[in-house]
Amino acid sequence: MKQIHINHLGVFAVVLLVGLSMLAGCASTPTETETTGQAAVFAYDEATFSAAKPWTEAEFQNNPEEFQFVVIGDRTGGANQEHTFKLAINQLNLLQPEFVINVGDMIEGYSDDKVELNAEWDEVDAMLSELEMPFFRVPGNHDIANKIAQEVWRERHGGTHYHFVYKDTLFLVLDSEDPPREAPEGIKEKLELYNRLQTEDPAKAQAMLAEFMSDEAVVAALGKNVEFDDEQVAFVKDALAKHPDARWTFLFLHEPAWENPSDSFKGIQAMLKDRKHTFLAGHLHYYDYDLIDGHEHITMGPAGASFHHEGPGNVDHIMWVTMTEEGPQIGNIALKGIFDRKGLDPELFGAYDRKGEE
């Protein structure tokens, strides 16, 4: 397996170093650290600050074994505003995580026309070409809604389940859509109408969504448990066996299979019971947190997809994960809360305002 090593410089430490040097009016010669023999990252004039100091004694968060990445949710499944994901790309470039991983549903899909499907992926890839760090894909029900969509995925992106290791941390991507579920009748046409109404008549769009989500066939489809075939279960077992000493294991899938677990998913959970791990999914367009047998199972809110439920989990956001020696530190950032050094741009941030909800 090819391993990529990226050194991540703590920007905060650098800024603080410069600021303190200016404050002190001098720049001291860096001292040698006791443990590495390398020049200290943080240095100050000890003669000026021999006793009290205008900063706290907490240690700098500059452990080279720590790293940061971002998880981002569904772009599609009824779009709230077409610019939301584009703005998310810009904001990720401001934040500069080491990589980004999506939990599925990047295209609207539900088509058996290869030309149409490829055109949708071309649109997504054009946006992702602006991203300044690696982006890992996870297949969602909109991405591989049928056999033809699966073929397009494999032609463009390779396998639908895979794993990689980054800084002694194991990342497993599972395919919760194999085989694809039977789509509700007329789903493609309904999605096109809904997306158009979002702009033309937001109240009518909301009524249409409520009717769709209460349809018996839709309710039944959402209630089905997620099955994983023998090949995928064997893949998980093999990946875990190859990396028994990984300090943490992250598992990404589109549908939160723990909501209504199948026997195959329970089998995957059993393989992980003695490992430190975290599950992350999307699909529901609503942020949710579950602690199952002491392990975190998190459902991401969207990054452009429509809200399907009522409540505080309705938020376009990203998840910022810092992998530390103790485990992942997780913080969620609402997309409306990120802006560049020039300040709020009403033209850009207006794209986040949900029609009819402000």
Image (cartoon, helix red, strand yellow):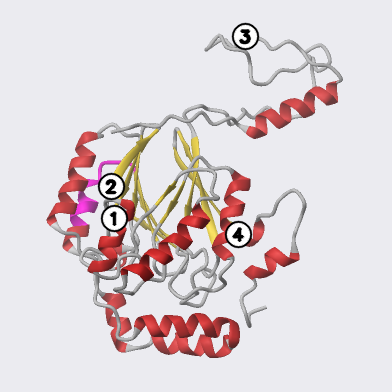
**Residue at far front of view:** 115
Residue 80 rendering spot, x and y as whole percentages: 54, 74
Q: Which residue is mark 2?
A: 162
Q: Is residue 109 left or right of residue 10?
A: left
Q: Which residue is mark 4?
A: 87
Q: Secondary structure at mark 1?
A: helix
Start and end of the magenta stretch?
266-276
- Characterize the local packing of mark 4: few (<14), some (14-19) or many (20 or more) Cα atoms within 10 angstroms: many
Q: Earlier in the sequence, mark 1 or mark 4?
A: 4
Query: Is there a contact, CB below 8 Å, between mark 1 and mark 4?
Result: no
- Characterize the local packing of mark 2: few (<14), some (14-19) or many (20 or more) Cα atoms within 10 angstroms: some
Q: Which residue is mark 3?
A: 32
Which of the 4 image quadrants contains residue 119? bottom left
Foreground mark, 2 or 3, reads 2
Which residue type carries mark 2?
Answer: Tyr
**How far apart are the two marked residues, 2 and 3, measured between alpha carbons?**
43 Å
Which residue type carries mark 4?
Answer: Leu
Q: Residue at x 69, y 12 (%)?
A: 30
284 is within the stretch colored magenta: no
Residue 305 rendering spot, x and y as whole percentages: 49, 70
Residue 280 rendering spot, x and y as whole percentages: 38, 55
**How far apart are the two marked residues, 2 and 4, measured between alpha carbons?**
28 Å
Residue 336 rendering spot, x and y as whole percentages: 64, 62
